[in-house]
Amino acid sequence: MSCSSSSPIPAQAGIGLRSHHFLEILEAPPPVAWMETHPENYFGEGGASLRILERIRSQYPLSFHGVGLSLGSTDPLDRTHLAKLKSVIDRYEPAFVSEHLSWSSVGGRFLNELLPLPYTEESLDHICTRIDDVQTVLQRPILIENVTRYLTWGGSTIPEGAFMAEAVRRTGCGILLDLNNVYVNAVNFHLDPFEFLDEIPSEAVGEIHLAGFDRFGRWVIDTHGEAVSQEVWGLYRWAIHRFGSRPTLIEWDTNMPPLSVLVDQAKQADAILGGCCVATP
Amino acid sequence: MWRLREMQEAFAEGITTGNHQAAADAIRSDGSPLRSVALYRRLIRTNYTQVLRVTYPLLAKLVGEQFFRVCARGYHARYPSTSGDLFAYGRAFPQWLLELDGPRLLVQLARVEWACHEVHQADDVRGPVVEQSDVEAWADPSSVRFRMNPAARLLACAVPIYHVWHALQADTAGGGYDEGAEPSPIPDETGLLVARATGTIQVTGLSPEQFLLLHAMRDGKTVAQVERMAAELIPADQGASLLAMLLDEPTRSAFSLEVTP
């Protein structure tokens, strides 16, 4: 299998690429359609990781999923971070570049957590300006991901799905739809996940994320440390029926299992994608 | 009505300082903002502790989970994150252990692990590496200088650390510590060379003589100067040892050559 620089990501299942599995992947490339990684892990100037990613990139279509840009922060955009991101994008030519609809720093304080925004007109104007700015620098559209939240900002006036839909309309960005996040928020705040999904414009969904969660007291936490739950598989079937087949990622970041477990989860997603009869736009 | 920036600043301030009520006031929801703040504070601290655990795996193993977690929390309060990219988070951890009056062995081990962390992602070698043929062809040793490669660090040791590092490393790699594979003792260990060689990071214990020579090489001394130092430091019956050391991994990977006209 070889992969050219312009390889698009097919509407099939991929897995998250983590250093934990580097050797296994190099020795026996797994039967998955594509891989996704955090670009921040490749901001270094050299070393084995960069060469390994080059090898993997030559075999699989790749997607970059950023975690450090603090897109929703009211601080100025971190131009150094953005320049590094542009540099790794130019080097590895991922098919997708995504970031979270969140903030993680303000006033020089870095919390390094994907914190939700209040869904207000002010936030919407702000995030659209930032998305425009990032897309201009990167010279490509990005996907924005819905995040988990463990709080509800007072004063939020726009439903989350409508907020994202409007950001898409104003900026031309796409959506990375994380169904585990939808489920976690629904459980923690007694929401109807389908109300959120109904607001999402089908044609904007470029990618879907599936992951596992843990329970901690009264909270369901998006840990990415477990297999995809039955409830999230159920949401996935519904979403694929509603949106059509989409590139789908099995995300796993903590409590890392053998690679074969991720591959099995990807096969489950592929089985659902294979049964879908809705045309991809 | 609060502006977005005011909300973000108040929330971040409350989370950072531990003033849960201030952060909860920023949320201003009818739900359970104090519970939300407590959870976020826990998630954030757990993230930072995990980053340190990945960067300092041997130290974490040596001191145990609970002590490491306490150190990590204290570190975060003293040296908060300064970037969205967490690569640099933990740079001052050895300094923090020193401020805690921690045993020198722990401070030294932390320095070695941070050096390994930096070397892992450092720039690749661009200049020519030291080769046997180069050494033999040095017609004018005063015109050739050593240059330490970006993926190498030379560390002075206040306490002997190499054997501790080696034992912990071997044990962490799995299968327990094999006493048969224990390296030879290094008399009066004075320093360590951390270098990325053939894709892996190697840590080498250095005697006082080796450390002085490598220190001179790192400082850009010419081959002629290093040879003179070696002649003074190394007994005549071990005359070949300088060349042997230069051509041995990981020293070879740690330096390249620069010819000055």
Image (cartoon, helix red, strand yellow):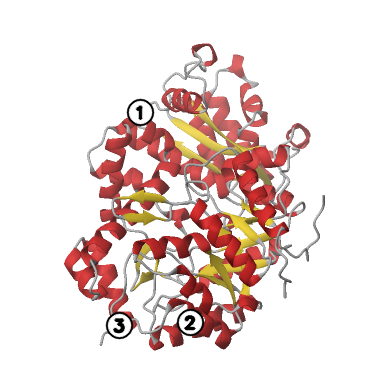
Q: Which mark is residue A162?
A: 2
Residue B189 lies in what quarter of the image? top left
Count neighbours of disc 1 (C-alpha within 10 A) and say few if under 14, some if 14 to 19, many if 20 or more: some
Work out whether A232 lies above or below B186. Answer: below
Q: Is residue A250 left or right of residue B87?
A: right
Image x and y of residue A8, in percent: 75, 65
Residue at the image point whose x is 34% and y is 66% from the top:
A189
Residue at the image point whose x is 46% and y is 81% from the top:
A163
Image x and y of residue A190, in percent: 35, 66
Q: Which residue in the protein does label 3 denote?
A: A155
Chain holding disc 2: A
Chain holding disc 1: B
Image x and y of residue B81, in percent: 36, 59
Residue at the image point whose x is 55% and y is 22% from the top:
B234
Q: Earlier in the sequence, mark 3 or mark 2?
A: 3
Q: Is residue B239 left or right of residue A75?
A: right
In this rendering, does residue A107 appear at all?
A: yes
